[in-house]
Image (cartoon, helix red, strand yellow):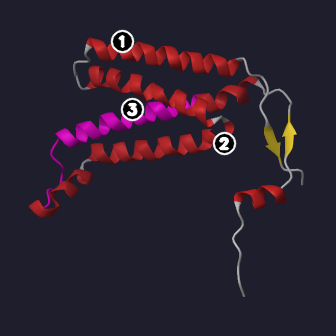
Amino acid sequence: MTKTLKTSSDLAQDAPVVVDHRPLSPVSQWFPIVLVLLNALLSTFAEVFLKIGAMHLPAIVLPPPISFVSAIFSWWVVLGIFAYISSLFLWLVALPHLPLHLAFGLSSTVHLLVPIACWLVLHEIVPLGRCLGMILILAGTLTLGLSHESRRYYNRTIDPS
C-alpha cells in the first residue's frame, strides 16, 4: 500500500474558500493589535527578568562542567521563561487575525520597551543614538497601526459547512 503526499496546491483545491466582505467591528478589528502589543510587553518583562536572573546567584549551583544549567534555578529566570511562553501564546492567538507584515511590524515595539525598561528597572544608560532610533521605530509603528485603522474590510475565510 503506497501513500502519496499531498502538496499545498492539492490541499487548496480540496477546500472551497468563501470570502466574507462584511465590515469588522471596532473591537474585533483592534483586538489582534492589542494582543500583539501585549506580546511585546510580555517579551519585555521576560528580557528584564532574565537579565535580573543572570545577575543574581541561583538557589542551586551545579559543578563546573554543567554550571551553566544552574541559571534555571533562579526564580527570575523561571518568571522570564513563563513570560516568553505567555507572549508566544498571545502571538499565536493574534497571528491568524492579522497580516504577518503588520503583526511583525507592530511587534517591533519591543525595541522601544526593552531600553525603557532597562533604564527604569535596571538603571542602565540608554545612549542618545539609541533614543533617536527608538523615535524612528515609534514613528514606523504608529504608521503601521494607523494604516490598519483605515482598512475596514479583510478577506476572511469562512467554512461553508
Tag 3 residue: 44
Which element is circle 2 on?
Answer: helix
Quarter assignment of residue 35? top right
| Callout 2 crowding tier (Cα within 10 Å): few <14, some 14–19, many ≥20 | few
Which dot, 3 or 2, sits closer to the camera?
2
Q: Amino acid at mark 2?
A: Pro
Disc 1 to disc 3: CB gap under 8 Å: no
Quarter assignment of residue 51? top left
Q: Position of residue 109 (x, y in %)?
A: 46, 25
Residue shown at the point (27%, 20%) measured from the top left: 119
Q: Main secondary structure of the magenta part?
A: helix
Closer-to-camera residue (144/64): 144
Q: Amino acid at mark 3?
A: Thr
Closer-to-camera residue (38/101): 101
Mark sitting earlier along the chain (2/1): 2
Tag 1 residue: 132
Quadrant holding the N terminus = bottom right
Residue 151 visible in the current orientation: yes
Residue 13 in the figure: left or right of residue 49: right
Tag 2 residue: 96
Mark sitting earlier along the chain (3/2): 3
Which dot, 2 or 1, sits closer to the camera?
1
Q: Position of residue 134 (x, y in %)?
A: 39, 17
| Callout 1 crowding tier (Cα within 10 Å): few <14, some 14–19, many ≥20 | few
Which element is circle 3 on?
Answer: helix
